Every structure is written in C-alpha cells, then in structure tokens.
Image (cartoon, rainbow, N blue to C red):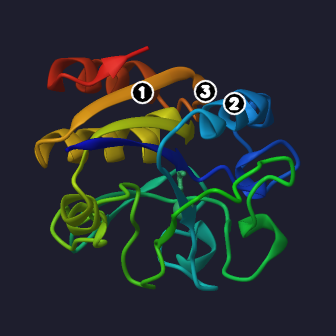
Amino acid sequence: MSSSALIVIDLQNDFCPGGRLAVEGGHEIVSLVNGLIKSSDHVILTQDWHPEGHSSFASSHDGREPFETVDMDYGPQTLWPDHCVQGTDGAEFHPDLIWDSAELVLRKGFRGAIDSYSAFFENDHKTPTGLGGYLKERGIKDLTLVGLATDYCVAYSALDAVKLGLKVAVRMDACRAIDLGGSLETMTGKMRDAGVVLK
Ligand code: VGL
Ligand code: ZN
C-alpha cells in the first residue's frame, strides 16, 4: 500500500524574523505546520546545513553582495547572506516547531562547492540527496510540502518530486516567500505548469 508524507522544508531560525536570511512572516506558519505534523502519517524535515565559507555565501566571493547572481560550474547561483551554518543557532529549527514525530531529518547544502535548494537534487540538478530512494523504498508516493521559502527550497523540491513521479501538493498558506525579482510568481507558475497542486 502506498502512503503519504508531509515534508517540512527549512523551518529554521535563520529564515525567520531576526535570522540572517529572514523570510517575511516566516514564523507565522509554525502553528499551522504543527497542526499538519500532528495529522500526517509520516513526517520528514529538511535542514539547510552549510559549512562556514559556503560557496552560496556572498561573503565567499570578493566584491559580491548578497542577492547578486554568479556563474558557477553548475550554472547561475544566487548569493546569500551567510545563513544556516552547521552547528549554529540559526541552523536550528524554529523553537516552537513540534517535530518529535519526524522520521527523517534530511540535511542539505553541506558540500562547500555546491548549493542545494531542492530536497532531492543539489543545484547541479544531478547529485541526489538520497531522499528519492528513501521514499521509493518506503513506498511513499504522495507528498505535501510546507515551509521556507516558497520560491526557493519549497518550489525546487516540489518540481523535482514531480519529475520523480511523485504526487505533490504545496500548502501555500503554510509557506512564506523570499520573492526576489518576481521569483514567487515565476516559481508558482512553474509549479502549477508541472502539475503541483497548490492549496
Ligand atoms: C533557501 C536560499 C538559500 C531556502 C536556502 O530554504 O529556500 N533559500 N538557502
Ligand atoms: Zn542555504
């Protein structure tokens, strides 16, 4: 029998107000997400987990500022303020998130030379995180995604999940966006076109 899972994307301190890459209203989704965690059969969390000096940090590129784009071997990469550094408070989950029932915490973005927005593939769109295989082995075919940020890690995860043949819904009310240069509209359109159910 196939089953379904809730995937909570990057609901971490650095993406909430007061954090180093704060998403407007990021903290507002916590109680809604807690309710969804309670009513889900299986819960998986992702955790953005960068080493110090990560290549996605503007501070690692001379003369570059956060939110500029650079060309990496694997394609264009937006530069970010330092965030979610391994072992720091900013990388912890929001303190009000009740995630005891989570069956898997998947860390991503831990390789210095490459970023990973998606929970399934790093930003070269080739290197797997292992999540696809994990879900396959467990017979989980149906996903609901929530978390931060709608237009980056949530959207890239949703699009990859569809490519892997999974049935995917995004609870937009339990997500918040960075919205850089129209990215929310662009990525919402891409999700809709790909067959992601936007709730
Ligand atoms: C994210 C930018 C950089 C996200 C992670 O979780 O959406 N965005 N790292
Ligand atoms: Zn990151």
- Closer to viewer: mark 3 or mark 2: 2
In this view, the residue farthest toward the front is 1
* Amino acid type at image mark 3: Ala
Q: Residue at x 71, y 37 (%)?
A: 34
Residue 182 visible in the displayed image: no
> Disc 3 on helix, strand or loop?
strand
Confirm or reject: label 1 Cβ below 8 Å from ligand 1: no
- Residue for badge 1: 170
The answer to which image quadrant residue 29 occupies is: top right
Left or right of residue 144, residue 87 in this image: right
- Tell me which label, 2 or 1, sits earlier in the chain: 2
Residue 44 visible in the displayed image: yes
Left or right of residue 130, residue 87 in this image: right
Q: Residue at x 75, y 66 (%)?
A: 92
The answer to which image quadrant residue 71 occupies is: bottom left
In this view, the residue farthest toward the top is 199
Q: Residue at x 13, y 49 (%)?
A: 164
Which percent across, then down, holds residue 128? 23, 71
Confirm or reject: label 3 Cβ below 8 Å from ligand 1: no
* Amino acid type at image mark 2: Gly
Calculate the distance from the C-alpha at mark 2 to the C-alpha at mark 1.
Answer: 15 Å
* Amino acid type at image mark 1: Val
Left or right of residue 163, residue 53 in this image: right
- Residue for badge 2: 35
Q: Nearer the viewer, residue 5 or 121?
A: 5
Calculate the distance from the C-alpha at mark 3 to the C-alpha at mark 1.
Answer: 8 Å
Which percent across, then down, holds residue 73? 22, 74
> Disc 2 on helix, strand or loop?
helix
Is mark 2 in CB contact (under 8 Å) with mark 1?
no
- Residue for badge 3: 174
Q: Is residue 185 above or below residue 165?
A: above
